[in-house]
Amino acid sequence: MTDTNELIRLSAAQLAQKLAAGEVTSVEVTQAYLDRIAAVDGGPRGVHAFLHVNTEEALAVAAEVDAIRAAGGAAAAELHELAGVPIAVKDLIVTVGQPTTAGSKILEGWHSPYDATVVKRLRDAKMPILGKTNLDEFAMGSSTEHSAYGPTRNPWDLDRIPGGSGGGSAAAVAAFEAPLALGTDTGGSIRQPGAVTGTVGVKPTYGSVSRYGAIAMASSLDQIGPVSRTVLDSALLHQVIGGHDPYDSTSLPDPLGDLVAAARLGNVDGMKIGIIKELHGEGYQAGVENRFNESLELLKQAGAEIVEVSCPNFKYALGAYYLIMPSEASSNLAKFDGVRYGLRVLPKDAPLTIERVMGATRAAGFGDEVKRRIILGTYALSAGYYDAYYGSAQKVRTLIQRDFEAAFAQADVLISPTAPTTAFKLGEKLNDPLAMYLNDVATIPANMAGVPGLSLPGGLADEDGLPVGIQLLAPARQDARLYRVGAVLESLLEAQWGGPLLAQAPALATSVVEPVETLETQEAK
Amino acid sequence: MAAINRDDVAHLARLAHIEMSADELDRMAGELAVIVDSVKSVSEAAGDDVPATSHPIPLTNVFREDVVGHTFTAEQSLSGAPDAYEGRFKVPAILDED
């Protein structure tokens, strides 16, 4: 068997190969990750990527996969390629047998009576679920600091943010606490954490991965997608979770295409790659620009043609997003009223009416950012303002779609930095909502138009040595192009670095904590 | 477009069923004024001829076969509720007076 320290650094694709070849068991792999979580996640200087660790069930699924493999025959042959490869799930996605909090006090201790479709698909593939990862409350934020359960730390620098809202999923993968994770992306919540933690994150085409069981923030923007350390691993996971779902009426009936084959193709010769004029330059950190320009040079050397495209209406995207998203969120979050789920707070004085209970419950259960967005959304939807705010924002959405159409007439794939800066310090932007919102300036247009986007590591910024993300965008339903170009760029960059970028991340201090309970120790009891 | 003030926020908080203290209203009004100001340009971006987009990839008439599918039991539906009574959600008085 492989050394556990090496084991946790393997990609999901490599783990799958070793599992299939019988070189390692799923219990060994799953236990190695649980041990890693125990060593680096807890304590005052821990990464804090996980809100819940699912030890018992993960090991049981792993043992089941090992037993099927050991028995051989048809059942073993039918195992999914990723069977036995563990995964972490963002705590916005509902799971039977584990709590789902959405990072909010209002759902503390709540258990879903059903599994999200993507979770069901993980179970069908027999992938052990390691636990639930931290996030900004109801996925509202760009730093994971808005979690009611405390922030996640960036494994590259524990005093910095891991991005958000899916900072937990990105940090778990970056800290080798999981080989794969699920995220959700409404305005960049998969891609921006990927960028600042040196990992890969993909927002699929809107509707191509079911949203059933993802607690909704903005239903017309939300999308579940893969988080991983390599482009191929994201393609493998995307293929597991994607495809039509009758439980989601916005789910696309179209086939996904062979994303894994696209990631393995590794060829950009003759492809046209468009630089979006409006998504780099002014407002972007110099080190981010430098790594971005290097990636362009590499793609050119690999045979791609680099063209410049203009998307003039992208300058309205952030503003329109901050009208549409809160409007939809204020409506989606109305259901958290102290009646059906989680928290109920009684007002201190009489009269004890349902309205006052709702007011007290939501006051105590929601954090500041959630309240801000609910109020903003209620404002944008109120009579007299609806046309000027929500209506105008929906028109901007049309203009952004037209910009994308024009750009994709000139280029097969578009490219930009994923985020304007590297990871900032914890607390630095917490009291300045507008500065926080600007992190998503390059990722929001894709959500507004429903097109797919992928972020991959582009190297380290000169000024601070922190990871920079490169974003690729493709037309709707052409997710395969992201994997094709992403895999090429990744291999060219890794050839320069002499290995994966994460190999350059500082070692995390490991703490000796309570040993994680295993099936063996339980049986011994 | 009009700026957002403290009275607006108090009114919106009531509509949204969120109790807010005086301090919270002050702070929220200040923060929201900045945000609302920053999104103002959106109303000038598009002319009357531009149609609105409500969903990025529209699908129409999404139907399924009219057969009974999976349903939750009352017990499952009530499993996360703060209070329940005889198979129903239990809530405080709906009306002000008893």
Image (spheres, helix red, strand yellow):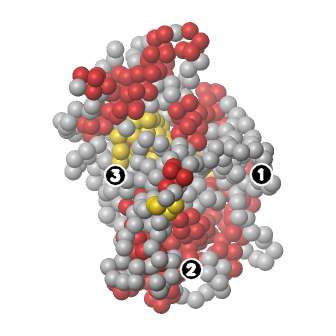
Tell me what residue is drawn at x 42 percent, y 25 percent.
A62
Q: A116 or A42: which is nearer to us?
A: A116
| Residue to which mark 2 is pinned | A379
Q: CA distance from mark 1 to mark 2?
A: 31 Å
Q: Secondary structure at mark 2?
A: helix
Which quarter of the figure is the N terminus of chain A placed in? Answer: top left
Q: A246 or A281: which is nearer to us?
A: A246
Could you tell me the amino acid type at mark 1?
A: Val
Left/right placement of residue A272 relative to residue A136 reads right
**Disc 2 residue crowd, few under 14, some 14–19, many 20+, Cα 10 Å:** many
In front: mark 3 or mark 1? 1
The picture places residue A47, in percent across and down from the top left corner, at 30, 46
**Disc 1 residue crowd, few under 14, some 14–19, many 20+, Cα 10 Å:** few
Give yes or no for contact between labels 2 and 3 (Cβ–Cβ under 8 Å): no
Could you tell me the amino acid type at mark 2?
A: Tyr
| Residue to which mark 3 is pinned | A152
Q: Chain of mark 2?
A: A
Tell me what residue is drawn at x 64 percent, y 44 percent.
B70
Tell me what residue is drawn at x 33 percent, y 65 percent.
A428
Q: A445 or A284: which is nearer to us?
A: A445
Tell me the quarter of the picture where residue A60 sits. Answer: top left
Q: CA distance from mark 3 to mark 1?
A: 40 Å
| Residue to which mark 1 is pinned | B62
Query: Does residue A227 show up?
Result: yes
Residues tagged by mark 3 and mark 1 found on one chain of the structure:
no
Pointer 2 or 3: first along the chain: 3
Tell me what residue is drawn at x 21 percent, y 51 percent.
A44
